[in-house]
Structures are given as C-alpha cells and as structure tokens.
Amino acid sequence: MGKKREDSFFSKNHRAQVTIFIIVAIVIVALGILIYLLYPKIESSLGGGEENPQTFMQNCLEENIAETVGILSSQGGSMNPENYFLYNNEKIEYLCYTNENYKTCIIQQPAIKKHIEKEIENAIKEESIVCFNDMKESYQNRGYEVQLSSGQTKVELLPKRIVTTFSSTLTLRKTNTERYEEFVIVLNNNLYELTSITESILDWEASYGDAETTTYMNYYHDLKVEKLKQTDGTKIYILTDRNSGNKFQFATRSVAWPAGY
C-alpha cells in the first residue's frame, strides 16, 4: 500500500515538473518573439541603429520639398505669383498673358522648368540649413567629431522624379573616418511630364490663342486636362495625373473678347 502511494506521489511530482518545464518553455519563446519584435525600438533607444547621413537628410527634407512642390503646382509654378488670376481663393499665375483683346498672349516664363527648379531651391533653403545643423548635432551627441562644410544646391525636374542635390561635405570621425561629399534627395513626382505638356499648351496659346485639350488626353490616357474659361477671357488649365493625383494648374489670357461678346 505504501509502495503505491509513493509511486503515485512521484508520478504526480513528475507531471508537475513537466508542466512547469512546458510553461517555462512557452514563456521563453514568448519573450524571444517579443524581443525580436521590439528590438529595433530597443536598439534605437540605446543609441544603435543609426541613420546614415543620406537617410537622415532624405527623411528630414522630403516632406518639406513635397509641400513646396504642392504649392508651386497649384499656383502656376511660383511661390509668390505677381501676375495672377484668383480662382477658388488660389493665386494662379498667368504663364501666357496679354491685357489686350483679340491679340495672342506673350509667354511669361519661357523656361518654366528652370523657373520651378529655382523656386524650389529658394523655398527649401532655410529648412535645409536646419536639417544639416540637426544632423551635425545628432552625430556630435553620439560621440563623433564632425566637420561640415556647405556647398551648392541643385534642383532638377527629371522624368517621374524631382532630384535635389547638395554638394556639401561631411566628415565623421570616431573609431574610423567617414566622408560624404554629396547628399541627394529624391521625390517621386511627375511634375516634369506635366510641365512638358504645359509648354506645349503655352505654345498653342501664344501662336493661335487657344489649345485643344482632348488631343492631349487622347495621346496621354492617364492625363486629365481641364480648361475653365472665365468671363474676362482668362482660361484656367488644370493638368491632373489620374494615377498619382499630381496636378499642375496655370492661367492664360489670349485672343480674349470684350465683355458682352
């Protein structure tokens, strides 16, 4: 009888130990999964997982460049339009204009792409200085010896993207020495394509006083072209990429008729 009780006791004890081992194993696996999921955040809080300088500048400036491009695209390519038509509370610059009736307009921005590139460059200047200073301070706080010299800024409208290049030099010294001589910020945007079509429309406006919008939509199936005529002879052109939603709008006044006709 005593033997059976002893065997029963050891059997229960063995099952209890197995249960404990299973629970411990489950806890260890769960902790392992949790650490794996949270590791990037833990590493970041401990100072690891540093962004490289190129990524730092891309993350710092991309939103500012995108906002700038959005404003320019809605205002005919200028941050502060001077000769404009007020439409839906937006100042839309005249890119081809005459104040006379019956006459064709004169193109106001012969090199619209170059004009927009310069407008972007000027608009992001202050924010780029802030980003470079923040990057320098960030690496100094991590124990790096930092040398930063500023260089020229170049903005380019290219097919399907806008590229901003800073010819600034950054040298980082800690255990090793790292040197960066260029920072390139890329924004996915088809403003290049939209301004190319704008130039074509402006040529028609300056030569003949009008442009046929359906021709462009028949050729570019992802493009929507709107021409909104105003009472004073002004026309608002709105070019929209149906896939991305990117748009560019501008005003013209060409071969306008007097009021009442």
Image: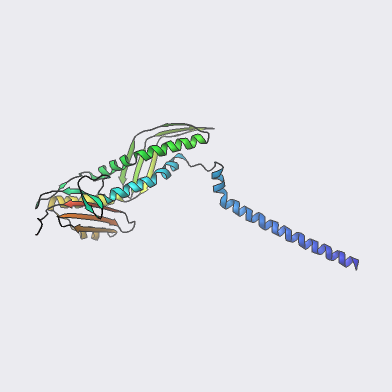
Residue lying at the far front of the rendered structure: 89
Q: How many numbered marks appear? A: 0
Question: Could you tell me which quadrant the C terminus lies in?
Answer: bottom left
Q: Nearer the viewer, residue 86 or 248?
A: 86
Residue 103 position, x and y percent, is 10, 51
Residue 49 position, x and y percent, is 53, 43
Residue lying at the far bottom of the rendered structure: 1
Residue lying at the far right of the rendered structure: 1
User: For residue 130, which quarter of the picture?
Assistant: top left
Residue 141 position, x and y percent, is 51, 35
> For the point 26% across and 59% down, which residue is it?
224
> For the point 80% across and 61% down, which residue is it?
13
In the rendered image, the vertical position of residue 234 relative to residue 79, given as above or below? below
Residue 150 left/right relative to 45: left
Q: Nearer the viewer, residue 110 or 234?
A: 234
Q: Nearer the viewer, residue 45 or 192?
A: 45
Question: Could you tell me which quadrant the N terminus lies in?
Answer: bottom right
Name the image colouring: rainbow
> For the point 37% across and 45% down, which residue is it?
64
User: For residue 127, which quarter of the picture?
Assistant: top left
In the rendered image, the vertical position of residue 24 relative to residue 47, given as above or below? below
Residue 145 position, x and y percent, is 49, 31
